[in-house]
Image: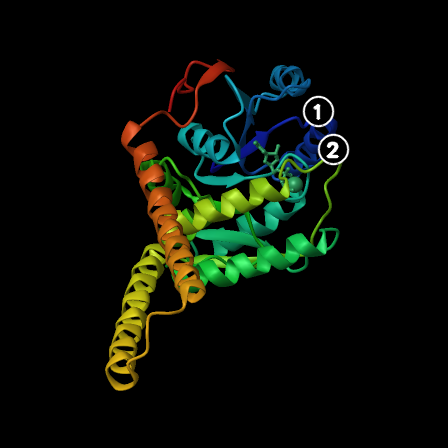
Amino acid sequence: MKKISLIIPCYNEESCLSAFDCEMEKVVEEMKEYEFEILYVNDGSSDHTLEMIRRLSSQRPYVRYLSFSRNFGKEAAMYAGFSNVTGDYVAVMDADLQDPPELLPVLVRILETEEYDSVATRRVDREGEPPVRSFFAKMFYKVINRISDADIVDGARDYRLMKREMVDVIVEMGEQNRFSKGIFGWIGFRTCWYSFENVERAAGETKWSFWKLLKYSMNGIISFSQMPLNIASWMGVACTGVSLLAIIFIIIKKLALGEAVQGWASNMCVIIFIGGVQLFCLGVIGQYLGKTYAEAKKRPHYIVSECSDAQIKKIG
Ligand code: UDP
Ligand code: MG
């Protein structure tokens, strides 16, 4: 009997969990030929999420859980999930029903009958999302696909069913600055894309503010591309080139026309401009250095303060 493991990151999801559990129970009933393991990861919620998860785990034999000592973020929650599940097929699913559990039978069928190692889902529209956010999201996907080899599809969700081999590789990739959408694409394997229409959150609110998303996307770019560093170098080359031309121009002008020194204002503009470019480039280098610092410290991705069974790694 094959085993399906589902990882459910939860951060203040008390209003969604019972609906999620209901939907999930239906799917488990429907797919009797598979063994299930549902691992809830409580990411330092400040509401009653943990109590609800505890109750679910005492009611349902297939539910396991672990609870972080504080909020470590969805990426850490997914990593903790991947490190602790044991199934042959593994998927991450949001607790807010935006990753429809009823798709699971379809995804499993694709994995079983076709030559794929994973089935990834993407939403074809962004209905119900603020237009500004959609615009920036689209821009982000364009930019990151052009400047990195992460291969990220617009609208891709973290909801994808993967075979064991892929999960083992993901756990091996222990980088601190995790950007799972990029990691999934970067490791390769044969992926089938399954499109579905956007589903709005069942209850509660999104945990991603615009700034959080912006930070996350910057992290994605820095984790998967060195293009910003290249841009900084090329800006240096361009500035040097332009200033060389300017020097030649000024010397010739002086020799030919013998004009006296003038142009304090334009001089100041150039100095301030170059100063800005230099600070910008330093900032870009600083971003990479900061990430390197975080990697060098090798701190754990997560710390568990409570869990359902002894098999769960407390630090990882
Ligand atoms: N989440 C988490 N830690 C966080 C933020 C979010 O575990 O710091 C979980 C959240 O509980 C949900 C999933 O990640 O199950 C997706 O979050 P959300 O629905 O807020 O994101 P959106 O769907 O709006 O992109
Ligand atoms: Mg959501």
Task: Say which label, 1 or 2, has the lower sequence index.
Answer: 1
The spot of residue 21 in percent (x, y) is 68, 29
Label 2 beta carbon within 8 A of ligand 1: yes
Point out which mark residue 14 bears: 1
x%, y% of residue 89? 47, 41
Are there few (<14), some (14-19), or many (20+) residues within 10 Å of tag 1?
many
Quadrant position of residue 122: bottom right
Single out the mark in the foreground, 1 or 2. 2
| Residue 114 vertical position relative to residue 183 in the rendered view, above or below | below
**Residue at figure coordinates x 40%, y 28% from the top left:** 301
Who is closer to the viewer here, 152 or 289? 289
For marks 1 and 2, give the CA distance: 8 Å
Q: Which residue is painted at 34% across and 63% down in the image?
A: 235
Q: Which residue is mark 2?
A: 204
| In the rendered image, the vertical position of residue 108 relative to residue 55, given as above or below | below
Circle 1/circle 2 CB separation < 8 Å: yes
Q: Quadrant of residue 82?
A: top left
Instruction: Tell me the number on the disc at residue 3.
Output: none
Percent x, y for residue 109?
Answer: 55, 52
Label 2 crowding class (10 Å Cα cut-off): few <14, some 14-19, many 20+? few
Nearest the viewer among 283 and 64 is 283
**Is residue 123 in sight in this rendering?**
no
Q: Secondary structure at mark 1?
A: helix
- Point out the quarter of the image occupied by ligand 1: top right
